[in-house]
Amino acid sequence: MEPEELERAVEAVLFAAGEPVELKRLSQAVGCETGQVREAADRLMDRLSFERRGVRVVRLEDAYQMCSAGEMGDYVARALETRKPPKLSASQLETLTIIAYYQPATKAMVEKIRGVDSSYSVSALLNKKLIEEAGRLNVPGRPVQYKTTPDFLRTFGLSGLEDLPELQLAELGTQDQLTMEEPPAPQEQKT
């Protein structure tokens, strides 16, 4: 398939899908190697951005999605009469940051780092679809583990988790302080 035709095919599939399409699935749909499809999707992404079109193609880890350009958001919102998503509270942002950097993370881990109950924040982030369950930890009680979602990447304009800024552990404490080990039992005092 010619590069221009491949680019048009990728554009058509992404437009029709309305959601992220994995590279492997795109490759199967157009009948080309994944490397060729990745190049075509990247060219399309660059062209739409360079021409300052009303739509963009974004890469979300190993998937691509077509969406409206950020600078067109006000027009889209007015046309569709949608409300802006609610802002994240400071506690929700802290919780989301911990989960993003330490995923998969349990609520207990988040609470240990934050030092406060985080049930409401975890629940709110689940409702906003910024995090999702990622299985259960194989320890007594089998706590739920959480990870970020493609909506998280899209909301924060990230292609993948590798785009997160480097974490400064000095601000949060040492790595030893962040482990999930139980603290030593208090010693009995002799009288």
Image (tube, rainbow, N blue to C red):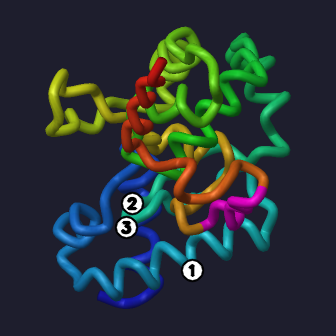
x 70%, y 31%: residue: 93
Q: Which of pointers 3 and 1 lies earlier in the amino acid sequence?
A: 3
Q: Amino acid at mark 2?
A: Ala
Image: 174 above or below 9: above
* Circles 3 and 1: CB atoms closer than 8 Å: no
Which of the two discs, 2 and 1, labels the residue nearer the N terminus? Answer: 1
Q: Which residue is labeled 1 in the image?
A: 43
Q: Position of residue 158 (x, y in %)?
A: 62, 57
- Tell me if residue 166 is in the magenta stretch: yes
Marks 3 and 2, how far apart at CA: 15 Å
Query: In the rendered structure, which amino acid carries the disc numbered 3?
Result: Ala
Q: In this picture, which residue range is highlighted in magenta? A: 163-170
Residue 63 - label: 2
SS at mark 3 in the image: helix
Counting from the top left corner in percent of width and height, residue 178 is at 53, 48
Q: Amino acid at mark 1?
A: Arg
At a point 50% along the width and 12% down the height, the residue shown is 119
Q: Main secondary structure of the magenta part?
A: loop
How much space separates mark 2 and mark 1, taking CA atoms?
15 Å
Compared with 126, 57 (above or below) is: below
The answer to which of 147 and 54 lies nearer the viewer is 147
Q: x and y percent of residue 25 in the render?
A: 22, 61
* Quadrant assignment for the N terminus: bottom left
Give the side of residue 96 with respect to residue 80, left or right.
Answer: left
Image: 167 above or below 1: above
Number of numbered discs overlaid on the protein picture: 3
State the residue position of label 3: 9
